[in-house]
Image (cartoon, rainbow, N blue to C red):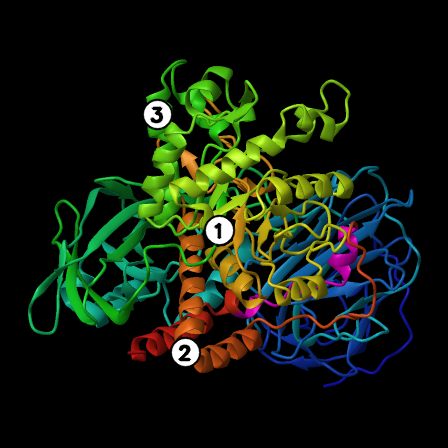
Amino acid sequence: MKFAAGILLAVTAATGGEWSFDGLEPLTSDDGRQSLTGSAAVCRGEGIVGNALYFDGRGDFLELQLTGESRPRDEMTVSFWGRPEADSEFFQLVRSPARDLCFDGGPGFGWYEVHTASGRQIYNGYAHPQRLQPEQWYHFALVYDQNALELYLDGDLISRTAAEQPGELRFSGEPWRIGGRLREDGGVFHGWLDDLKVLPAADRDFGEVKRLKRRERLKALGSESLDAYRRERMAALFGAGAAGLPYAVAVESGLTRILPAAFHPGNFQPEVAVESAAFERENCQLLILPYEGRRLTGFSVELPATLTDAAGCEHPFDFKASRVSYDPMPKPSPYMYPLPRIPDRLLELEQFEAGGDEPAVLWLEIFTPGRTPAGEYRGTIVLRQPDSPAFELPVRVKVWNFELPERNVVPSLVNVWERDLQSYVEEGDAEGFVALLDQYCSMLLEHRLNPVVLAHAGLVAPWLRRAVYPDYRVENGRAVGNMGYFDELIAKYRRRGLSVVAVGPHYNFDETKLDGGDWWMNIQATEPAKIWSFIRRHAAERGYLADAVAYPIDEPEKEVELVNRVENMLAVAAPDLPMLLTSGGANYPDPAMPGVDIWVPILHWTNRPEQLKARRAGKPVWTYVCTGPNYPLPNLHSDTPPCGIRMLAVGAARFDYDGLLHWAANFNTYKNAPAEPNPFAAGEGTYIYAAADGRPIPTIRLKSLADGMEDWTYLELLREKNPAVYAEIRAELARLIPEREYDRAKEIRLQNPREASFHTFLDPEAFYAVYDDPAAWLAIRHKIGEALSAVQ
């Protein structure tokens, strides 16, 4: 049944409107006082409950006229269920042409705003951890209570924007559009709408919403209860005995984020199955799902020390299981959900407990030793819970016919925040500090990242600088440095894969301006030419000059003249020592600084034409992230799903970067620090935590980044060994993660990041194809592995 557009009805009800679309007049509110006008089809029984309205994606749309008596004033709730079809451009469905209210967005993004009578705008946006999927019901609610504007998805608060000037809502008198054609310039909703409410009160009672959402999810599973579904799957995969256990076991990819108390049916598989090269670590997750809220105590996992090949011979494999810790999120990155707890740290525990609605999530690592022959290997993981039978979970590892090199193929540099580590040792304990620093550097190396070693002397106490650091200086006309600890660590790390050695002093802007003098003159007072000549000569004598880079300045922004002075000095003092420069607030590469050898622009503020030009001229262009960009672009924020972390490295390879730098792995992890070690940018810069005694604690983010660095290594090996197949894979990756089209003729001002933000080659939605379906990237990775295995 279709409803033709008609005259808008003026109503006098002050109670708002609620439409279930179930009555004789489905476009009239349930109390009969308020009407929608326009065109939509009533679909019998298609609603979340009862009937629903269907919008055809072409001409259908509705309007709601709110008079002075019926409109929300001091408070407001707008809510509805929506089920878009696959081609729908919009998921949120309400918009006022006069922008009194805006509540729309796509499957990956959303935004909302209202205006108060004072003319103030309350605006915010958000990004979904994964794109909302077509053919599923979602409940949206926008709630204004004078203090803030809140957005709820499926009954959960996902965004809140405080009102700077609270008060009555603005009212233009223009009707609101609901569904269908939201804008004159295009953009339509195609799908179903149900249970629309426009209320003059802040209504946060979403118990029924959560019940209906759970019912829909169970319906999709074909089961009446989550426990029943899990028992059925356990029985089907492992037999009746497994169905009788007090828990279920699900295997999840390491690319999936498991949130506490979330509806999670479990990805049930008959075994743990991974593909790996020799000398590679693969990751997955095990979910222990207690039935009916039972508490499991004393739960333990027994890991195999060997796996058996097809001939029955045993081979050593290194298994490790860690408990995923749900940690308070320091602060959400802009446009992401303010989740109260995030799966982040990985804790080693011999036993653990689980119960209630929250699964116990175990992070499982399988390391394939070097020189392991190609083939398929099998074994068993044994899970034990007191007073119940042991459960045996099969393991299968396919090892490809190639080995990852121990040396880090992809250039990288990651800073260890030495300022924090010094707080765990007593004054004078140089050996204790070096031992602790070694643990952090070794953890980075283990995860295919090159640590920056003893470079930031200005961050530590004077006693430590003199005892441990090179402490470069000029004495009696000669440059000298305390190179003992530095040489020892660099030699050790190069044996273990270190491929980039950051050398020399770091010139801190603030420190050199303390006396009010010229920045360069303060540097000159230390006779830098002599110091850098000494550094270059020492690197040559120790055999690592070919791997060394000078990293003297970080994020100089507009200090072009000063950078050129430092470049010119290095060109004379150490001509074969390349200078690396990070960008900060500029769009690098910048041709105004011709002496830079390795450009490191931030990911989303890269001048793409200059990047490609620099690479053609033989100058590498790395990239990095630092508090931004925000999700859904890849980054290292704690609220970014693991796939988004991994795509930082894969995306860097796809967009032609030559290496990766990161400013900190353990920022603000000093002793007696608050529980939130890095309170800005969602913990960015803290993907290695510190234990109570200072020891490093890894995170899911570190493991995901390491997986990405191994993916990047796969690509580089394929480029070298089979260029033809590499070109095919590269084209497939470009299709999976498309480059944004923009007007390349329009100038990008190098010192204005906003220009790059508007004209960037990075499409904010480009990576959603992988976030939605991580298997899409894993399928490409499988092709790379097979191609490398075939190379003789």
**Residue that lies at the very extreme toward the bottom in this rendered image:** 1
As shown in the figure, which amino acid type bears the numbered disc 2? Asn
Q: Tag 3, which secondary structure?
A: loop
Q: Residues within 10 Å of mark 1 (few under 14, many from 20)?
A: many
* Residue on which disc 3 sits: 693
Quadrant in the picture for the C terminus? bottom left
Which residue lies at the image location 71% right of the left edge and 62% below the top edge? 610
Q: Which residues are magenta?
A: 752-769
Question: Mark 1: which secondary structure?
Answer: strand
Residue 698: mark: none
Q: Which residue occupies the foreground of this view, 408 or 564?
A: 564
Q: Give the amino acid at mark 3.
A: Asp
Secondary structure at badge 2 equals loop
Is residue 474 something one can see in this rendering? yes
Q: Who's the residue at 74% across and 42% down the image? A: 145
Q: Are marks 2 and 1 in contact (CB under 8 Å)?
A: no
Q: Is residue 629 left or right of residue 163?
A: left
Residue 203, placed above or below residue 375: above
